[in-house]
Image (cartoon, rainbow, N blue to C red):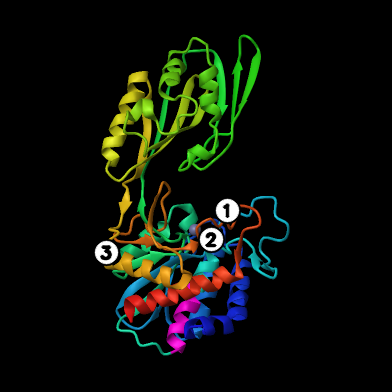
Amino acid sequence: MTEIRKYLENHKDEMIELLSELVAIRSVQGAESEEFPFGEKPAEALNCMLRRCAGYGFSVENVENYVGTADYGSEPLLGILTHLDVVPEGTGWSGDPYALRRTETRLFGRGTIDDKGPSVASVFALRAVRELKTPLRRGVRLIFGTNEENGSADLAYYRNKRQLPPLVFTPDGEYPLINGEKGMLRVYFSAELDEDICINAGKVINAVPEECVVSYRKKGELVVYNGKSAHASTPEKGDNAITAFLADYSGDSRLLKSFQQYFQHGDTSGSAIFGENSQDFTCVLSLLKTVENSLTGGIDIRFPMNRTKAEVSGIICDVLKKIGFTIDKCEGSEPHYTDENSDFVKSLLRVYERVTGDKGYCITIGGGTYVHEIEGGVAFGAQFPDEDGNMHGADEYITIENLLKNAEIMAEAIIEICG
Ligand SMILES: [Zn+2]
């Protein structure tokens, strides 16, 4: 057993205690005020963490309750980025989501895997390095955000005020390492309705709609189409209720008939829109509603590294305009890519292989991570392959072993990069 691992084993209960303290703070986004940009609770979690970090001997800074940092050493070369805000608990929990529940192998509670557990792991990784007096050439900065779950306005603010270290990874994704994130586009559109029909489908633009309710006012007929919800970055895991309706549609609306052509049921890559090379795209018609005399809708698109936002929005907007829609809003982000042959990526994968004994490799995902806007940034952890900690769901958990293993990997990464 390495010295690092031994240190972490000896501090296991202390780690769990800090995690328990953080989980008890329901740091869901709340009402904005001048002092609390994301509500009081995310700031409370941040200040709790910073107090602890100061106690461990790190120099801390709270940047106006947006982001807090804890430094060890000067001129930080490496930044480890985590967040202390959480999504609401939802329903279906076996116990209180804000009272950490410990079984022999697992820790249950909102935020345990996303991202309070990894955040605690980063603190104990740096403590281990410091207290074992491992010599470092360059400093390390732990960065704690408070708005990852609602648009990452925390990081945008922080980057305006301070400079990030040159190398940043976030344990807010998965292992081995995410170096590629597809680009994203969200298009909202509307047109004057050309049939006496009432449609209501989809709640949010980034999810496959699970229900589409259609009523034909004249006939007095109501039909409910059922599908299966999934994140818009992985639509193949769901079943789109809107396209199920379109496949079944035999009315008079020219708008809906055109849609039939472009959004075929079961096609999740938008092949009728983006052509033959669409296999790396995802395209989800996620919102469709009639509001008085207009038909409004939304589409979520994820596109590969070799395309740009301007190019993709040009294609989809042309199609929508041709059908007869007005584009109300079109927003998104470019793809994110960090060179897999960079020293940074190679160092992290080397550490992963050494600690886990498993093969390290890079992956690309359809979703965006916390480092999407950070040049050269990667997501490294915290979920191991084939592991599911019920992130954002009921009974979210991290195993005690993986809490320790995350801390061990981060400590070794600090030494590898800054030692
Ligand atoms: Zn997260």
Q: On the image, numbered disc 3 is attached to which residue?
A: 342
Q: Residues within 10 Å of mark 1 (few under 14, many from 20)?
A: some
Q: Earlier in the sequence, mark 3 or mark 2?
A: 2
Q: Which residues are magenta?
A: 122-132
Residue 252, percent from left and from top: 49, 9
Q: Nearer the viewer, residue 121 or 347?
A: 347
Residue at image point 51% right, 83% down: 1
Callout 1 touching callout 2 (CB < 8 Å) = yes
For discs 3 and 2, the disc positioned in front in the rendered view: 3
Residue type, mark 3 in image: Ser
Residue 313, percent from left and from top: 31, 35
Q: Earlier in the sequence, mark 1 or mark 2?
A: 2
Residue at disc 2, CB closer than 8 Å to ligand 1? yes
Q: Which mark is residue 298?
A: none
Q: On the image, numbered disc 1 is attached to which residue?
A: 392
| Residue 366 as seen in the image, left or right of residue 39 | left
Residue type, mark 1 in image: His
Q: Which mark is residue 114?
A: 2
Q: Where the C terminus falls, by quadrant?
A: bottom left
Residue at image point 63% right, 71% down: 20
Q: Is residue 47 above or below residue 36?
A: below
Residue type, mark 2 in image: Asp
Residue 207, percent from left and from top: 51, 39
Residue 292 in view, yes or no: no
Residue 152, percent from left and from top: 42, 56
* Residue 129 inside the magenta-drawn segment: yes
Instruction: Identify the secondary structure beneath mark 1.
Output: loop
Instruction: Identify the secondary structure beneath mark 2.
Output: loop
Look at the magenta stretch and give its main secondary structure.
Answer: helix
Residue at image point 38% right, 23% down: 325
Q: Quadrant of residue 321?
A: top left
Residue at image point 57% right, 27% down: 200
